[in-house]
Image (cartoon, rainbow, N blue to C red):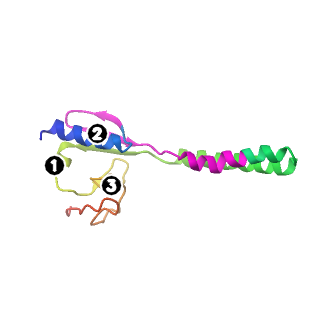
């Protein structure tokens, strides 16, 4: 398998897993995993208190304003959490894919597994998610 096929196969695998292509060349590619807040979390933290606040405001101005304020505070915390997360970036070359699995240092100083690209401890002997054994560095 030549370099282009190897890189294309790995790129397809990563894009299916949710990674986005940042740049691509003949020798490698860079992908990014953006931070995504689940819709269930935002529904529970923001929309439910907001809806309850509007409903409670029909019967009591005090309870309605308290729940509405709670929804605004939770929405602000959710927005700060989203702003505070950095996307994970990886640069992958064909040479890296041909070598036995060793820990990969991502550009944003996070050590990741070369198979599943999830964060691992810098001194790990195997990945806790995909269970691949790492060759000594």
Residue 115 image position (x, y, % from top left)? 27, 53
| Circle 3/circle 2 CB separation < 8 Å | no
| Residue matched to label 3 | 112
Reading the image, the residue beneath label 1 is: 98
Q: Which residue is pictured at 23% across the width and 63% down the height? A: 133
Tag 2's secondary structure? helix
At 23% from the left edge and 40% from the top edge, which residue is drawn?
9
Which of the pair 127/30 is nearer the observer? 127
Q: Residue at x 38, y 48 (%)?
A: 108
Q: Where is residue 97 drawn, in percent x and y?
A: 20, 48
Q: Quadrant of the N terminus?
A: top left
| Residue hosting label 2 | 12
Distance, label 1 to label 3, CA atoms, is 17 Å
Residue name at image x 21 percent, y 39 percent: 7
**Magenta stretch, residue numbers:** 21-50
Residue 129 quadrant = bottom left
Q: CA distance from mark 3 to mark 2?
A: 19 Å
């Amino acid at each position: 398998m030549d370099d282009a096929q190897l890189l294309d196969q790995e790129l397809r695998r990563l894009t299916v897993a949710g990674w986005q292509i940042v740049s691509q060349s003949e020798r490698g590619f860079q992908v990014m995993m953006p931070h995504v807040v689940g819709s269930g979390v935002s529904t529970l933290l923001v929309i439910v208190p907001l809806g309850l606040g509007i409903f409670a405001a029909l019967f009591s101005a005090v309870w309605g304003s308290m729940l509405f304020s709670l929804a605004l505070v939770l929405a602000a915390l959710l927005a700060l959490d989203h702003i505070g997360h950095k996307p994970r970036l990886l640069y992958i070359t064909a040479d890296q894919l041909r070598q036995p699995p060793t820990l990969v240092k991502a550009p944003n100083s996070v050590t990741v597994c070369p198979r599943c690209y999830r964060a691992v401890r810098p001194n790990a002997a195997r990945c806790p998610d995909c269970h691949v054994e790492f060759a000594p560095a």
